[in-house]
Amino acid sequence: MSKTNFAPLKLFITGPTYIREDVKEAAFLPEFGHRDAENDLRFGPIRENLNKLAGAGDMYTPVLFLGSGSTAMEASIRSLVADDETLLNVSVGAFGDHYYNIAVANGKKAENLKFDYGQAIDMDVLEKKLAEMKPDVVAFTHNETSTGVTNDMKAVCALIRKYNAMPIVDGVSIFGGADLDLGNSGAAMYATATQKSLGLPAGFGIGFISKEAEEKAEKVTNKGHTCDITKQLGRARKNQTLTTPNCTLANQMYVQLERIVNEEGIQSRFDRHVEMRGMVEKWVEGLDGFEMFAPEGFRSPTLSTVLCPAGVTSAMLKKGVKEALRGQGYLMDPGYGKLNTAMEEAGRRLVFRVGHMGDITPDMLAEYLGKLEAELKKL
């Protein structure tokens, strides 16, 4: 085997994230045929545990899409927005814009309602737009990875439905780290992925699809093949994937979900994420010139975004703090590139992010924050 110079780093970025050793070892479990009875032994428990973790009850069918969260999001656009319909996308950051860009790339009639970086959805502004535009479908981000803002999913979905539109939701960076109560959320389809709060490698997009969404998709044309949720649902109900899955990741997913549900416990996992958010908030309070970026009451339990003092540049964060921590065995997140570029050009203070999702523990986070603080003080 050839030698490599890959650095063994502890990841405190916002995805991909830290993977436990037992999850890594699960990659060595036996391969299997994806149309064989062995498949049921993996995907049966996977689908059952996904529904438990989402609080979906019997209201949604979980589907695994080969790819990423973007794959599941694109499937929701292709399958749920007809050619003669309009989509309103509601964005509170760069990943909110992503849903809009996917819609436009697929030729959909779409508008993008944007809120300022670091702010949650303003319900009054959204209501005015809904009344004016009367869209058929509304897409929004549950947890904005670029800003650390969490929107009130139930309230937003309820408002959307007040205007007879269908809500579709991007929950890529929060699923597995917070109580969704998806069965009572009002979302028609909820898209997420493996590589963030589930603490798994990238490779599957995950879609929770309601009966309402399935019935609409049956009437929509030009859905493609892998983006056709009706085809995906047919295979999912047989505990299969539409096309050949990553069997290695399926083994890892089986092990990880069994551990989350039956060993750590779902509520304990959610409580741990809330505890770590509180740790970062308290830590930031003790840093001169730094403050939390997201407003109180809308802060993500899976990642925190911190506003830097005036004068701190992207170069300082990337070439200074990030590389200094790399030398100590940590991968630091110097802020989402597009966000900080826009903030810098506007003469605004920059941000950096702290990922505390998945299987990061409070002890691991405390150690990292101590190292990060030492480097920030050098600024």
Image (cartoon, rainbow, N blue to C red):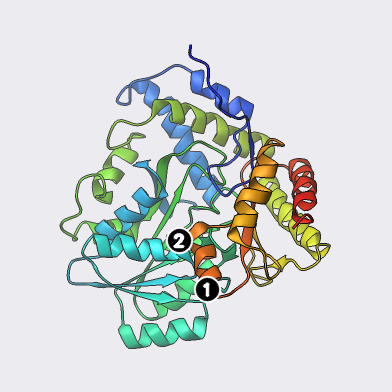
Q: Nearer the viewer, residue 146 or 320?
A: 320
Give residue 285's quadrant in the image.
bottom right
**Which amino acid type is shown beneath numbered disc 1?**
Ala
Give how far across and how far down residue 38 sits, in percent: 39, 21
Residue reaching furthest to the right: 286
Q: Nearer the viewer, residue 214 or 317?
A: 317
Give how far across and how far down residue 136 sits, in percent: 29, 74
Q: Which residue is mark 2?
A: 95
**Which amino acid type is shown beneath numbered disc 2?**
Phe
Residue 230 vertical placement versus 161 (above, below): above
Q: Which residue is mark 1?
A: 155
Horizontal relation, residue 4 to residue 126: left or right: right
Q: Residue at x 77, y 45 (%)?
A: 371
Residue 192 vertical placement versus 329 (above, below): below
| Inter-mark Cα distance, 1 to 2 | 20 Å
Judge the density around disc 2: few (<14), some (14-19), many (≥20) Cα neighbours within 10 Å. Answer: some
The secondary element bearing badge 2 is classed as helix
Q: Residue at x 34, y 49 (%)?
A: 71
Residue 300 seen by the camera: no
Q: Nearer the viewer, mark 1 or mark 2?
A: 2
Residue 54 vertical placement versus 44 (above, below): below
Give how far across and how far down residue 325 sits, in percent: 69, 42
Q: Nearer the viewer, residue 115 or 361?
A: 115
Give residue 243's quadrant in the image.
top left
